[in-house]
Amino acid sequence: MVGDNTPGRWPDDIDEWNRRAYLAATAGSTAGIVWLSGCVDDTGNGDSGEGGTDENGEEDSEAEEELPEGVSEEEFERGPVPEEYRTALSLGDEERDPDDLTPKAAVDFSEYDEAGDYSSHEPGMCCANCADYIPDKNGDTFGACAEVEGYIDGADWCTIYEELPEPSVPDGLSEDELATAAVPNEYRTASSQAGEQRDPDDLQTQADVNFMESVEAIAAETAPPGQSCGNCAEFIPDQNGDTWGACAKVEGYVAVEDWCSLWEQISDET
């Protein structure tokens, strides 16, 4: 996702960016986010006079941070999350129980660029392609988790990461046919999770949009961490119980764990 919402490889100087600021900025929306940013020097560290860390590496009181509007740091870490997430279903169809959640500290909750420090993390794994993730539902760029407290960014990760299962090939189709097959009637003119109606006569092919699994795309640095069809504005979730979905822009069957170069952030402007 670079500039015009078309993902590409990370910029060479990505360490000089705040990760979440990069994701929100390149998605074209900063709606609902309060940015409290320090200056960034040529090492990627915040200027000690305006947030970040001081010359001794100690965190300043004005350290760089971003929170949804009106949300305290404590609420961000522990909740409660907005009402639309409290008992929502995750990408893996698990219902969130607000009375049975694990603190982030207990699951080594990390940003993607820190997750590699843990032996259980594999390249490409992040919340956006985890079965427990609940994608953004209100345009603030954050989601939630069916197992962990607080607000969750799609580019985060924790040690209870659960891989999304590959849907079974529908009866009457082969795996090779999924990319170009006509989708069931429930999807033909359905609206995406951001409200865009699908036009079956105006779709791109999966080959044209670099269609692949999210984990694979992120591991190869084709996509930045935090992107999957499951949290894309163009995705049409399962309508008939077969665990497949569709896309408002791309033909064929689409699964929540997939990704393509048309990925678009769900936002208030979408």
Image (spheres, grey):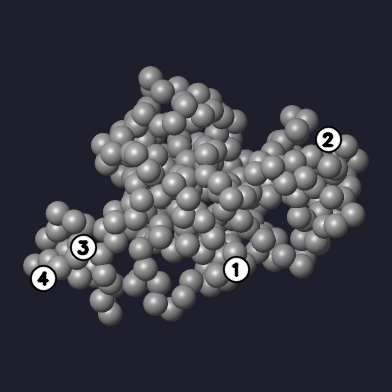
Closer to us: 26 or 209? 26
34 with respect to 228 (left or right): left
Q: Amino acid at mark 2?
A: Glu
How far is disc 1 from disc 3 in space, using C-alphas? Answer: 29 Å
Q: Is residue 116 visible?
A: no
How far is disc 3 from disc 2 in space, using C-alphas? Answer: 50 Å
Q: Position of residue 270 (x, y in %)?
A: 62, 50
4 with respect to 101 (left or right): right
Q: Amino acid at mark 1?
A: Asp
User: Which of the two labelled residues, at mark 3 and mark 2, occupies the earlier sequence position?
Assistant: 3
Which residue is located at x 46 percent, y 75 percent?
11
Residue 52 has which mark?
3
How far is disc 1 from disc 2 in space, using C-alphas? Answer: 31 Å
Residue 4 has which mark?
1
Q: Position of residue 77 (x, y in %)?
A: 31, 38
Q: For mark 2, what is the residue?
A: 186
Which residue is located at x 36 percent, y 51 percent?
34
Mark whose residue sits in front, 1 or 2: 1
For mark 1, give the secondary structure.
Answer: loop
